[in-house]
Amino acid sequence: MKNYTDIHDIENIPEMIQEAIALKANPFQYESLGKHKTLIMLFFNSSLRTRLSTEKAAKNLGMEVMILDINSTWNLEFTDGTIMNLDTAEHIKEAAQVLSQYGDLIAVRAFPTLKDKALDISEYILQSFVTYATVPIINMESAIAHPLQALTDAMTIAELSSKKKPKVVLSWAPHPKALPHAVANSFVNMMQSINVDFSITHPKGYALDPNITKNTPISHNQEEALRDADFVYVKNWSSYDDYGKVLHQDPDWMITKEKIGHACCMHCLPVRRNVVIEDAVLDSKNTVVIQQAGNRTFAAQAVLKKLLEQL
Amino acid sequence: MKNYTDIHDIENIPEMIQEAIALKANPFQYESLGKHKTLIMLFFNSSLRTRLSTEKAAKNLGMEVMILDINSTWNLEFTDGTIMNLDTAEHIKEAAQVLSQYGDLIAVRAFPTLKDKALDISEYILQSFVTYATVPIINMESAIAHPLQALTDAMTIAELSSKKKPKVVLSWAPHPKALPHAVANSFVNMMQSINVDFSITHPKGYALDPNITKNTPISHNQEEALRDADFVYVKNWSSYDDYGKVLHQDPDWMITKEKIGHACCMHCLPVRRNVVIEDAVLDSKNTVVIQQAGNRTFAAQAVLKKLLEQL
Amino acid sequence: MKNYTDIHDIENIPEMIQEAIALKANPFQYESLGKHKTLIMLFFNSSLRTRLSTEKAAKNLGMEVMILDINSTWNLEFTDGTIMNLDTAEHIKEAAQVLSQYGDLIAVRAFPTLKDKALDISEYILQSFVTYATVPIINMESAIAHPLQALTDAMTIAELSSKKKPKVVLSWAPHPKALPHAVANSFVNMMQSINVDFSITHPKGYALDPNITKNTPISHNQEEALRDADFVYVKNWSSYDDYGKVLHQDPDWMITKEKIGHACCMHCLPVRRNVVIEDAVLDSKNTVVIQQAGNRTFAAQAVLKKLLEQL
């Protein structure tokens, strides 16, 4: 594993999940591994869970952490050959190489525009760091992927599932704002890679990128799709076809106690209560969102450990 | 001590003061106590002394510190049962439980609105963390209390007083902006709990919450009140009756060299020179504000130590 | 060395350069020197390299680091005797003394106004910290000096030069915004202090402070000045005579492959590509800007080490 930009960077997913579970049981076992190593965390967008869990993961491994909210410095230029006489002060070519001298690993969070589809799909911010940095890059949620979240999700399912092949359903749910596809994309990628009975349900118009969903079954009938599910992963995303648009906020798609049945209700958080998921679910034993968020630390730690071992 | 939200959480105040004094003499004595423990510091409002002294206190005890300026992430929802389709993105129920998995202790700073009296008195932000977090909560100044400051103040009086029962006067002083009651409230609570001859002086209209001042003597004649004081604690606060209002900025109430006499002049800082206290006092030997600010580290350290010991 | 506000604070520059080079070879050699010591980094202005390299330098020496973006707290007052009833909440007298109790060293970044020449030259922010703090002050770029950068620059020339007395030219280059003189000033000071053949080239109207340039040769003919240079240090600055103005952005002064010849091209970064220096230079082997930025860590570390040894 050279970088962790996507879940496909993981060579052996089941092994990685077991590593994360083992680290949770013994978080400080490898605290000498990161000695004299520095993680730089770069935020183009705000963060609560990702920031704190990744920082904590690095410290559990004995690393130093340096955090930079890049928006409070200046704008970076990502286009090659530009005459930089406008509002960008530093080119990614310099920035990435310079940061590679201060950090042994660089983690980057950079959300999509949700306006320019081609630009977002190009992952230009994350991929520019991969291209120009000379140290491994970790994706803390990019335009189209959130692989630290997906590893957490798989770890949580592994912890909770008593079945050999649990039924997992990703369900779209309403939200007032236009949200990215990154969490859903990486969850789909991950579910396609582990031994689960996986399907997706969303209203018409909300199909994800077909290059990601591939042959995963998709239903527009939420009730039918959720029947007998062991895990329901709830997530809003804006339209991919009518790119970045909120087509409607159909409250009928909110996840209710009735719909969830006996399934474990998963969500990456933050979640808008009584819009995405109703209180009766989030306040019940069905919800595993807190455990899921707690697992973020150990998923990140498994990734950092793997990258440190290969430095 | 389960949390430190108020000075009444301290079981034995004189012992806590002596602990803080002992830590000042030997700050690194317990540096293994906090090993593998993390303090999360959450700021809803800006901070200089509280932020740096609490961070330093935690590090002196060997803790890791993670800091989050919550306003640079997103708005939290504190009301139960809300349909969260407006400007709050995460409910305190999730946030507090999630943070409790990343931190062993959580410190919170959240000022009052100074507009909605009932809301401020409810301490809804701090108390929501107490309710939903599963780890101890430390108050880094809430709507109505600043107990880390009050412990510092008591420690400073203990260090400086040669008398068995010194005369301590809390004096209101003018300020151009509407300020909270938190520092004054906690100072009053603290002075009522230790062996001092305590009184308050303020102009008419500036009475503090009577549930806090109780039977503490109150005078509207500053000159008379300050006579023969050993310690004068200077602080502005906005009106409590005419809630959050600056009724006047009467410069006659500014603390002058003449008024202070031989007393030690205390203030929590930041202080507006020549508005609250004149230069002639702040630049004289009478002022103990720097020592007081320095003591913040050790008061915080005594609190963190107590909470760590009870984890 | 009591403080590091200016390169003239260094007693023995060649020794300091060798120290920095030695630290680069063995960054963790002195990691017990900073144990139980804290560096406070105060930012009045944004920073990428200075922030991360100085933080890293401190941690390499085993120090704790606390960072405060002072603009996100409140405005400091620097004038003596002011009646502080306007927009400043805390006087530097208190702030500097308080911070001196939380940090063993204080590093400050505070840019010039570029509007009030006399105020900028007075270095009122940095000098107020020197006056009122009770611990050493480190300049992380002030109104008129950037001595951490200049030490890095001298270190980089020392690493790269095969000649006993290399030819070094400081060349002005165009930029759309009004930039400070700090980097150029400290570079001039440094070049005057080490064994190089040093000259400056800039368009008419862009003369630096003559008290700094002294008898350093100055040419208005860039082509002639750069001929046979071993090192070309590129930097924009606004007019000093017509204070803080961008007189023109003459693209003829951009540094090109042709102009640079066989010289090493230096720049403190961030650099606007194809405005200050063209791609053909920055993407060639001539550029040493990445090495230069990497050296920031070790120049800072040499300074911190010296100050720690003298605590």
Image (cartoon, coloured by chain):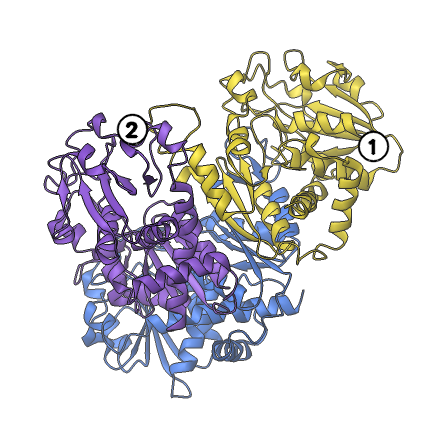
Chain colours: A blue, B purple, C yellow
**Residue B200 falls in image quadrant:** top left
Name the secondary structure under disc 1: loop
- Which residue is found at the position 80% from the left and 17% from the top? C224
Please state which amino acid type lies under the numbered disc 1.
Answer: His
Task: Decide: few, some or many residues near mark 1? Use Cα within 10 Å; few <14, some 14-19, many ≥20.
Answer: some
Q: Is residue B211 visible?
A: yes
Q: Is residue B244 left or right of residue C4?
A: left
Specify the label residue C262 is tagged with.
1
Describe residue A192's horizontal placement relative to residue A247 as left or right.
right
Residue at image location 17% in from the left, 37% down from the top: B202
Labels 2, 1: one chain: no
Residue placed most toward the observer, A280 or C149: C149
Q: Position of residue B71 (x, y in %)?
A: 34, 48
Mark 2 neighbour density, 10 Å: few (under 14) some (14–19) many (20 or more): few
The quarter of the displayed image where residue A227 is located: bottom left
Viewer-proximal residue among B193 and C165: B193
User: Disc 2 to disc 1, how far (Cα)?
Assistant: 73 Å
Chain to which the residue tagged by mark 2 belongs: B
Chain ID at mark 1: C
Name the residue that disc number 2 marks. B258
